[in-house]
Amino acid sequence: MSQQDVIGGIDLTDDHYVIKQSLIRNKYAVLDSSGQTVLKGKQKLFKMKEDFPFTTPDGETIYRLKAKNVLDIAGDYTLVDERSGDTIAVIEKKFTLFKHTYDVRSPNGEHWGRIESESAVVMALKSLSDIAGLLPHSYSITGPGGRSMGTIKERFSLRDIYDVTVGDTGEAPREAIVAAACAIDALEGN
């Protein structure tokens, strides 16, 4: 099975995606480079543990991101194939003071990549000031050895809109990178 097509029924082979958050709650639409919705996701409300299902545009759940623990100061989120129940990837939220840092690992623990906010200074300002919180978020996606795999950049707008650029992800499935981009916005309260 190719890492670029881990889950049947979804095509995440583009190099550029736009993630748009709904105005009302943590619901997301993922659009490909032609503007077509290829994936939807939403954070389940009032759950003790985070549960973040991802669906096709027709509403069929294809995978979900599930928290391992109730508290998410630092912790693991498992990306699970809805049909088979198999773990696709583990997204580990690292505890850091002023940066958002997530490691993407294989189900057996192999390090696939890291998604990290790009500026500790901007993140510190955001945590201290509501006005600075309006500044767009920006993340780098790196692979083993610091190799660049892409970026996640928020646009300046009333609702959260991110441009996700994904290059060669090596062994990491694109599903994990795109799911992490949606989940980071919800989990960090961006």
Image (tube, rainbow, N blue to C red):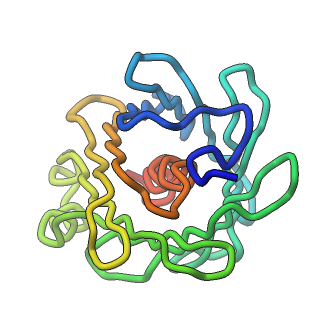
Where does residue 171 sit, x and y in percent of width and height? 51, 64
Picture quarter containing residue 164?
top left
- Left or right, 80 with reference to 174: right
Q: How many marks on residues?
A: 0
Residue occupying the point 54% across, 40% down: 26
- Which residue is situated farthest in the left direction here? 121
Foreground residue among 28 and 16:
16
Foreground residue among 25 and 100:
100
Residue occupying the point 50% across, 31% down: 30
Residue occupying the point 46% across, 73% down: 103
Residue occupying the point 42% across, 57% down: 169
- Left or right, 177 with reference to 60: left
Vertical relation: 42 (above or below) 180 = above
- Which residue is situated farthest in the right direction here? 84
Vertical relation: 3 (above or below) 158 = below
Where does residue 173 sit, x and y in percent of width and height? 55, 55
Where does residue 116 sit, x and y in percent of width and height? 32, 67
Where does residue 167 sit, x and y in percent of width and height? 34, 48
